[in-house]
Image (cartoon, rainbow, N blue to C red):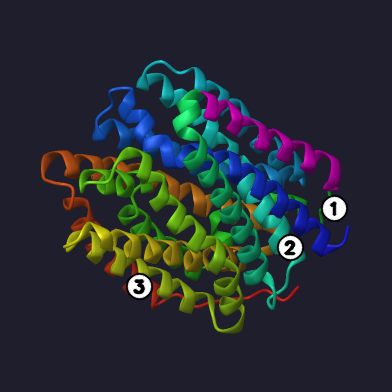
């Protein structure tokens, strides 16, 4: 199958999946609060979700390298997402959301194998833009999902919308089953795979992992940002608009930032992403007018757009070729586990001190992440 066709199928599937996801995401913190959960519970649920993403990404990446099969993890991931949304629609209390969230985020078993497929069929001149295109379609689907949430929430409410959100991911699963053909991969290094060791990864991989981990500890769930908007005076029906602003911005700029990463360096666009996050943090800390939130969420969208394509490209290039899915999955696992701590810590700081306390903590860690990133040396594989 031609490279462009494979990437387009993945992009369409990602668009549909994120359309379903983002019917829910802008309403998610409001839904949890409606079930009588506090900010610590919100941080716990979202943090557990992030941790499960990480664990599922690592094990699916490792298994994909071991068995030389990647497609099955992709379509199963979309199926998990679809079924979990049906569960959300039926939930009557917030504790039941914990196992449902685990099942939902376990759907991320698709991510490392899919990213490895894209990295394999790409080269150093287009890997960043291919990941950027995928993220652009993800975010475009999210924009459409948010628009559906904005237009129909008042008429349908949480539960009917959540049932509707299950359908697009189901379609994505069938697209992967029907149109993605598994490419035969040679198994010349079978013995090496069976005796896998993290010694095969060099110091730059671990140095970048350390930098990214510090940043992940600073990067708590978006749910806190939406609750912040509510607490400074915006009505619940207006909150999804902020989610729309940063998602639309991420959609529009993911591909240009991915292309910029190809033309300059991965580190350059990562530094830009960190800078955008620092600006957003300072905006939340020193907010003087609630109308400035529109600008802050736009900066947050630029942060997302510049970070994600470069991050995926860089970690795939720092991973050994024969362990690419494993390297991507391990990276996502560590960052996701730390994200559990990030959201949980943010919830505690919010409840004990005030809603700005998590942002001070985040600012300090982001600056440390930037310093560590300075020492990472890029390495691009020639394919």
Which element type, helix, strand or loop, lies under badge 3?
helix
Element carrying mark 1 = loop
Closer to the eye: label 3 or 2: 3
- The kind of secondary structure element at disc 2 is helix
> How packed is label 1: few (under 14 Cα within 10 Å), some, or many (20 or more)?
few
Q: Is any atom of residue 62 visible in this view?
A: no
Is residue 99 left or right of 188 when viewed as pictured? left
Q: Which residue is mark 2?
A: 120
Q: State which region is magenta.
A: 160-181
Residue at 41% of width from left, 50% of height from top? 241
Q: Nearer the viewer, residue 181 or 33?
A: 33
For marks 3 and 1, the one nearer the N-term is 1
Residue 221 visible in the displayed image = yes
Q: CA distance from mark 3 to mark 1?
A: 39 Å
Q: Is residue 332 left or right of 278 when viewed as pictured? A: right
Above or below 162: residue 169: below
Crowding near the residue tagged with mark 2, few <14, some 14–19, many ≥20 C-alpha atoms within 10 Å: some
The quarter of the image holding the C terminus is bottom right
Task: Give the quadrant of residue 104.
Answer: top right
């Amino acid at each position: 199958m031609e490279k462009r066709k494979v990437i387009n199928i993945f992009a369409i599937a990602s668009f549909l999946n994120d359309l379903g996801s983002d019917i829910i995401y802008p309403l998610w913190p409001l839904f949890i609060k409606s079930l009588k959960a506090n900010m610590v519970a919100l941080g716990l649920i979202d943090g557990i979700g992030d941790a499960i993403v990480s664990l599922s990404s690592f094990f699916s990446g490792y298994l994909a390298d071991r068995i030389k099969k990647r497609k099955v993890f992709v379509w199963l991931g979309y199926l998990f997402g679809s079924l979990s949304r049906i569960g959300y629609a039926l939930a009557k209390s917030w504790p039941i959301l914990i196992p449902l969230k685990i099942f939902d985020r376990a759907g991320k078993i698709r991510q490392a194998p899919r990213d490895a497929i894209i990295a394999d069929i790409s080269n150093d001149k287009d890997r960043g833009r291919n990941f950027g295109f995928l993220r652009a379609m993800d975010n475009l689907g999210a924009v459409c999902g948010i628009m559906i949430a904005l237009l129909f929430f008042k008429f349908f409410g949480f539960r009917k919308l959540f049932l509707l959100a299950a359908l697009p991911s189901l379609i994505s699963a069938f697209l992967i089953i029907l149109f993605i053909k598994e490419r035969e991969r040679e198994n010349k290094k079978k013995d090496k795979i069976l005796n896998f060791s993290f010694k095969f990864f060099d110091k730059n991989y671990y140095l970048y992992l350390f930098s990214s981990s510090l940043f992940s500890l600073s990067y708590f769930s978006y749910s806190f940002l939406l609750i912040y908007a509510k607490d400074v005076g915006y009505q619940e029906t207006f909150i999804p608009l902020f989610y729309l602003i940063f998602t639309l911005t991420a959609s529009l700029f993911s591909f240009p930032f991915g292309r910029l990463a190809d033309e300059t360096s991965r580190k350059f666009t990562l530094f830009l992403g960190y800078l955008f996050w620092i600006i957003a943090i300072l905006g939340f800390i020193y907010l003087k007018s609630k109308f400035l939130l529109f600008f802050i969420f736009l900066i947050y969208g630029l942060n997302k757009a510049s970070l994600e394509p470069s991050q995926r490209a860089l970690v795939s290039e720092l991973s050994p070729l024969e362990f690419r899915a494993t390297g991507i999955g391990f990276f996502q696992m560590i960052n996701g586990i730390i994200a559990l701590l990030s959201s949980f810590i943010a919830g505690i700081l919010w409840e004990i001190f005030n809603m700005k306390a998590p942002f001070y903590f985040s600012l300090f860690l982001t600056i440390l992440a930037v310093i560590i990133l300075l020492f990472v040396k890029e390495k691009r594989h020639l394919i």
